[in-house]
Amino acid sequence: MFKVLAVSAFIFVLAAEASSNLSCKTETTNAVAGVCPDGTTLLTGDKCCSSDNVFDVDAHGCSSEPLPAIDGLCPYGFILVADGGCCPNSDAVAKNKK
């Protein structure tokens, strides 16, 4: 019974992570065969990010007008926000998720 609960919980976590729009605050590395090293998180596009730098794009907005993102990427010092743009780190704000 415990194994069934553990497997169910694991699948639930995977499903919750799959529905998140995750990105990285720092540079990424390439995953090898869809696997990342310990201490990193797999993002879409087979990219690995330090687990400390992973964030949910949909949970962030910008207090200023964001710049356009290029292929979902932002320059250094900017964070990808829910509006599909790049916001200076100093202007990034948390959004209320519904």
Image (cartoon, rainbow, N blue to C red):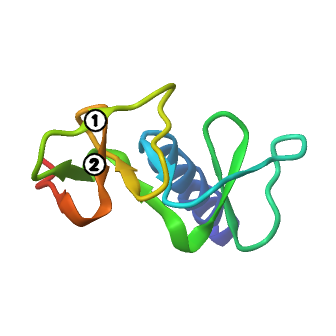
Q: Secondary structure at mark 1?
A: strand
Image vertical order of residue 45 relative to residue 77, above or below: above
Seen as rendered, the residue at the extreme top is: 71
Q: Residue at image x 89%, y 40%?
A: 33
- State the image coordinates of residue 59 (x, y, percent, origin top left): 25, 52
Image vertical order of residue 16 relative to residue 53, above or below: above
Mark sitting on residue 86:
none
Mark sitting on residue 87:
2
Q: Looking at the image, is mark 2 or mark 1 earlier in the sequence? A: 1
- State the image coordinates of residue 23 (x, y, percent, origin top left): 49, 49
Would you say residue 92 is visible in this rendering? no
Q: Secondary structure at mark 2?
A: strand
Image vertical order of residue 16 relative to residue 55, above or below: above
Mark 2, other Cα within 10 Å: few <14 / some 14–19 / many ≥20? many
Q: Nearer the viewer, residue 47 or 64?
A: 64
Mark 1, other Cα within 10 Å: few <14 / some 14–19 / many ≥20? some
Q: Residue at image x 79%, y 71%?
A: 38
The amino acid type found where label 1 is placed reads Leu
Disc 2/disc 1 C-alpha distance (Å)? 6 Å
Residue at numbered disc 1: 67
Q: Residue at image x 61%, y 37%?
A: 44
Seen as rendered, the residue at the extreme right is: 33
Q: Nearer the viewer, residue 56 or 8?
A: 56
Find residue 58 and report its image quarter.
top left
The amino acid type found where label 2 is placed reads Cys
- State the image coordinates of residue 60 (x, y, percent, origin top left): 24, 52
Q: How many numbered marks are there? A: 2
Q: Are the residues at dot 2 and dot 1 in contact (C-beta closer than 8 Å)?
A: yes
Horizontal side, residue 77 vs residue 92: left or right: right
